[in-house]
Amino acid sequence: MAKSIMIQGTMSNVGKSLLVAGLCRVLKQDGFKVAPFKSQNMALNSFITEEGLEMGRAQVMQAEACGIKPSVHMNPILLKPTTDVGSQVIVNGEVIGNMKAVDYFKYKKSLIPEIMKAYQKLEEEYDIIVIEGAGSPAEINLKSEDIVNMGMAKLVNAPVLLVGDIDRGGVFAQLIGTIMLLEEDEKARVKASIINKFRGDKSILQPGLDMLEELSGKAVAGVIPYVYLDIDDEDSLSTRLQNKNEIGLVDIAIIKLPRISNFTDFNPLEQMEGVSVRYVTNVSELKDADMIILPGTKSTMQDLAWLRQNGLEAAIKQKAAKGKVIMGICGGYQMLGEKLMDPYHVEASGEMEGIGLLPTKTTFEEQKVRTRVTGNIDNLTGDMEMLSGITITGYEIHMGTTIVNNQNGTSFCTLVDTNQTIENKKTDGYVSNNIFGTYVHGIFDSESFVEAIIKVLFKQKGLDMNQVKSMDIAAHKQAQYDSLADTVRSNLNMDFIYKILEEGA
């Protein structure tokens, strides 16, 4: 049977996901077969597995750190917020429907058998499972129905490491207060605390560590420094979305929609020399961007209304008329069309005019498209000619079906659904001069596509295209995971961690 250890936090965004990934990488380096697990994840960043099932992006990142393929067994429940008080509920990669928070709170304990089936599948394959909690185990209004923090730890008898974020202040109160609010059996399950995101001289921190150990009765297993790594972040708390980089040789503006999803699509762009990537929320921030990207969203119609109300729609149209490159992915692609129709009340119901930059119409369907794809970009002309023939891979997650009203332009690419047993080619997206859209998430993970789109922007500005250097995205990712593991190994008492793993809860 696999050994387990669980990382819980004093609150959201203390760095649980990255710490799990770092610990997974260390254990992998030490020769263990290790897998991540999070019983319930709430995020708009999701991924489609080889089986065509949907799971949280954080566990995909952690699986990459383990050197294994992502599986929905690593994240059996995914909640994708649709409103402030409701979410789409996905179990074992399949949508079971939308629920209000109060209804899901009453329902979620019925999912424990599904959680345990998923966990037991991992137990059969791996030596160690590193479990991630969510939010805080001390949310006293939620504890009775908990399935993701101490509730999960009890289900599998996992020892717990409690993480606090010193960068946001109040870390000693976070850790001691959290432990004080736990039941006695839960306190016993916490084996140590970890302070994360530390900047400065650890010797100055030592008196606080001594008092923390004395007051909490728990050892401090490590102090992890603040690290700057290019690793996929879990949710909209990501500092990437506050990115206001200085303008580079070419400047890419990504519209930070209120319900933005899968923003990790764009991480590879940030690694290109001479390229600035900025997330913008208003017209003044847009400035004179060379390329504007409309990303995915959980609520296309509502976010289009927001875009229209704050003046960004008009600004995007003006930039398009000046020849700036405009790209839409998934919901962003749908927005670029002429009309959005929602006859089944999937989103806001009714009909809505699109931005009108592409001759397409989208109808929201009750069935979600959920598949991995591979293929090639079609033979394009004009500004986009350099993209022609490039091989791309990625995945689709959308509720809409988009049709083209005329053929003044061309389809963007020709794809094969890799989840289908019979090869079934299809066209995707649309290109009209400097404007294009696609349903393919993960397209920027293709190095050749990233280089080509940057070369398009360099050419438009009359810059030397030799300044666009090739990059190996996969190798870069692996180097980042190794760097994370080096940080964790150097600052976490690994002998103590192995003792906890051996002794259990």
Image (tube, helix red, strand yellow):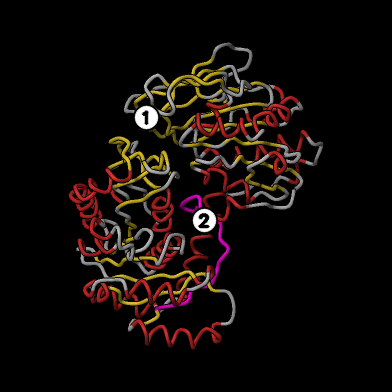
Q: Which residue is drawn at 43% across and 31% down?
A: 398
Q: What is the x, y in percent for residue 178?
A: 36, 71
Q: Distance between the residues labelled 2 and 1?
A: 28 Å
Secondary structure at numbered mark 2: loop
Q: Residue 368 shows which numbered tag? A: 1
User: Horizontal and vertical percent for residue 226?
Assistant: 55, 69
Q: Is 403 positioned to the left or the right of 387 in the image?
A: left
Magenta part, dominant SS: loop
- Determine the residue positioned at 37% across, 29% down: 368
Position of 148 compared to 414: left or right? Answer: left
Q: Which of 270 and 445 is in front in this view?
A: 270
Would residue 358 be visible to someone looking at this image? Answer: yes
Give amino acid for label 1.
Lys
Number of other residues with Cα within 10 Å of mark 2, as a class: few under 14, some 14 to 19, many 20 or more: many
Side (left or right) of 233 relative to 359 = left
Location of the N terminus (image quadrant): bottom left
At a point 57% along the width and 24% down the height, the residue shown is 412
Mark 2 or mark 1: name the one nearer the start of the chain.
2
Q: What percent of the width, then of the height, locates residue 72?
A: 31, 46
Few, some or many C-alpha atoms within 10 Å of disc 1 (few <14, some 14-19, many ≥20)?
some
* Residue topped by disc 2: 231
Disc number lying in front (2 or 1): 1
Local secondary structure at mark 1? strand
Hey, what amino acid is under mark 2? Answer: Ile
Is 13 in the magenta?
no
Specify start and end residues of the magenta stretch as a single range: 221-238
- Residue 451, percent from left and from top: 65, 41
